[in-house]
Amino acid sequence: MKLGLGLYKSLLNDANFRFAKQCGATHLVVQLVDYVKGGDNPTLTQIYLNGWGLTTAQGKFWELEELLSLKKQIESHGLTWAAIENFDPAHWHDVLLDGPKKHQQIEELKRMLRNIGKAGIPVMGYYFSLAGVWGWTPAPAGRGEAMSVVFDQEKINVQRPISNGMVWNMTYDAEAETGSVATVSREEMWQRLQWFLSEMLPIAEECGVRLVAHPDDPPLPEMRGTARLFHSFEEYEKLLALSNSPANGFEFCMGTLQEMPDGDLYALLDRHSEAGNIGYIHFRNVVGKVPNYREAFVDEGDIDMVRALRILKKNNYDGVIIPDHTPEMSCAAPWHAGKAFALGYMRGVMQSIERE
Ligand SMILES: [Mn+2]
């Protein structure tokens, strides 16, 4: 297993590549969608109920030269580019919404997937969701009053409609007509996912890229009038029934899976790490479950993280694990301190169990 760090778009520079290396990471998961605010001090503990902001990536696709140039920069620090996380709403809003541009957009997604393959990036993580990551509120709920993300269903109106021009909790069209996205059933969402995968997986296989799905965060069956695909273990595992392509797999978010109402997370991790179904892992901890939970430091949540790492070791999991979100620490660089703490913990446990 390999230790990685996920970097938001605003963090893709030499200073943060050095930071990753200094923390003991060998691999990077790169986000090319600019959604989390804060620049070099990114924060998840703002109010994002009105969205992550406006994407300005319309017409700006991921070209091979840019990918190769970033790859070269990453590798100059002795790091490996393990995955890209998330497609941009500007590039696939009508694939998610079944809108008029979906055929044009899927062709661009395929072209970008080929570029990803040519650049030698082996994994592409996606999150197939209309409401997206939504409904969090910030609070000093971590240990020592660390600012963290809380989900308390009683505090928010989970049925608040999604405005036109938005999807994935991000605005792709600021000029859209007033109104809201129509309700979408579970069957319809599965059909949309199935179409997306039937188009994308053959290309993914051909160009040696794995397409891996993140579960719904927060994991509710429905939000904002739209069904959510992956809100339980059973529904998440149905992904594999859609296609037996080796390119089809999980972006296994332990935090989100732990937030689901029922199921044995260790058994799920064991089953899928053994079967090779996992592209990479969000190694995140949490206290509580829907409808009420808080994101926690890696060592203070409900998941026994040492047990999880032992399962991965037993199964010779050779993919990447990254910290995902962490509570923000009280200092000048709250995001970096949170990640450094998580990576230090992860590396400590990994070294310890590797020597057993
Ligand atoms: Mn995650």
Image (spheres, rainbow, N blue to C red):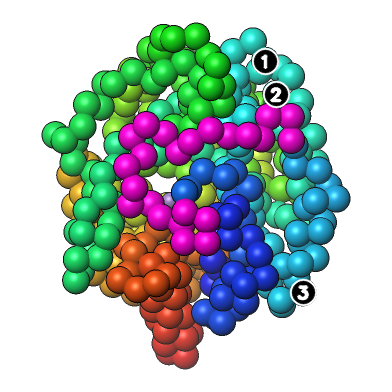
Q: Quadrant of the N terminus?
A: bottom right
Pinpoint residue 215: horizontal percent, then vertical percent: 42, 41
User: Where 21 falls versus 148 (above or below)?
Assistant: below
Pinpoint residue 35: horizontal percent, then vertical percent: 51, 43
Q: Main secondary structure of the magenta part?
A: loop
| Badge 3 element | loop
Pinpoint residue 15: horizontal percent, then vertical percent: 62, 72
Instruction: State the CA–CA distance, disc 2 to disc 1.
Output: 6 Å
In reply to whether residue 198 is colored magenta, the answer given is no
- The magenta segment is 38-60
Mark 3 residue's CB less than 8 Å from ligand 1? no
Amino acid on which disc 3 is placed = Ser
Tag of residue 105: 2
**Residue indicated by mark 3:** 76
**Number of other residues with Cα within 10 Å of mark 3, as a class: few under 14, some 14 to 19, many 20 or more:** few
**Left or right position of 254 against 125:** left
Task: State the residue in front, 313 or 95.
Answer: 95
User: Where 81 falls versus 101 (above or below)?
Assistant: below
**Left or right position of 106 against 85:** right
